[in-house]
Image (cartoon, rainbow, N blue to C red):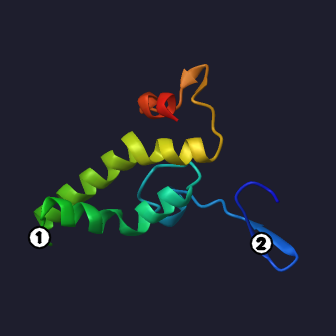
Amino acid sequence: MPVNAVASGDLFREFDKTLNSLEPKLDFHTRLSSAGLVYTHFGRDVLREITGAATSDEDNKNIEILFRKMYKNFIESVDAVDNGIAQFDGTPRSVSSLFHSIV
């Protein structure tokens, strides 16, 4: 079975969604793993619960900042490792090199 393919009877469908394809205002193009997909759908709610943020405009702005930072500095690395993207190809592809060294 191809990597990131979903079986559907005798057919295979490749999963190629990125954070940008699900939320065009976000400029992240690493293909989502299951972690990235779950984070995309539930991350803001989890961050809101952890921080105790309300739904005011100011809180929404802060949650959006946290959401982007968490994706950029951690979740995107999980997505990259899960999709077999090399950490280095001349220049570093990921800020979270610590994560790669652990895995």
- Name the disc covering residue 68, or none: none
Q: Nearer the viewer, residue 50 or 41?
A: 50
Q: In this image, 41 relative to 32: left or right?
A: left
Q: Residue at x 54, y 60 (%)?
A: 34
Whole-angstrom CA distance, mark 1 to mark 2, is 42 Å
Of pointers 1 and 2, the one earlier in the residue sequence: 2
Mark 2: amino acid: Ala
Instruction: Determine whether 70 is above or below 22 in the image.
Output: above
Q: Residue at x 80, y 56 (%)?
A: 2
Extreme-bottom residue of the structure: 9
Residue linked to disc 2 = 7
- SS of the residue under disc 1: loop
Instruction: Determine whether 8 is above or below 91 in the image.
Output: below
Q: Where is residue 31 in the image (x, y as percent from the top left)?
A: 59, 52
Q: Quadrant of the N terminus?
A: bottom right
Proximity of marks 1 and 2: CB atoms separated by less than 8 Å? no
Q: Nearer the viewer, mark 1 or mark 2?
A: 2
Q: Which residue is drawn at 63% across and 38% down?
A: 85
Instruction: Determine whether 28 is above or below 15 in the image.
Output: above
- SS of the residue under disc 2: strand
- Name the disc covering residue 56, or none: 1
Extreme-right residue of the structure: 10
Q: Where is residue 51 in the image (x, y as percent from the top left)?
A: 15, 59
Q: Position of residue 83 (x, y in %)?
A: 63, 47
Q: Which residue is drawn at 63% across and 32% down?
A: 86
Mark 1: amino acid: Ser
Instruction: Determine whether 23 is above or below 55 in the image.
Output: above
Q: In this image, 71 relative to 50: left or right?
A: right
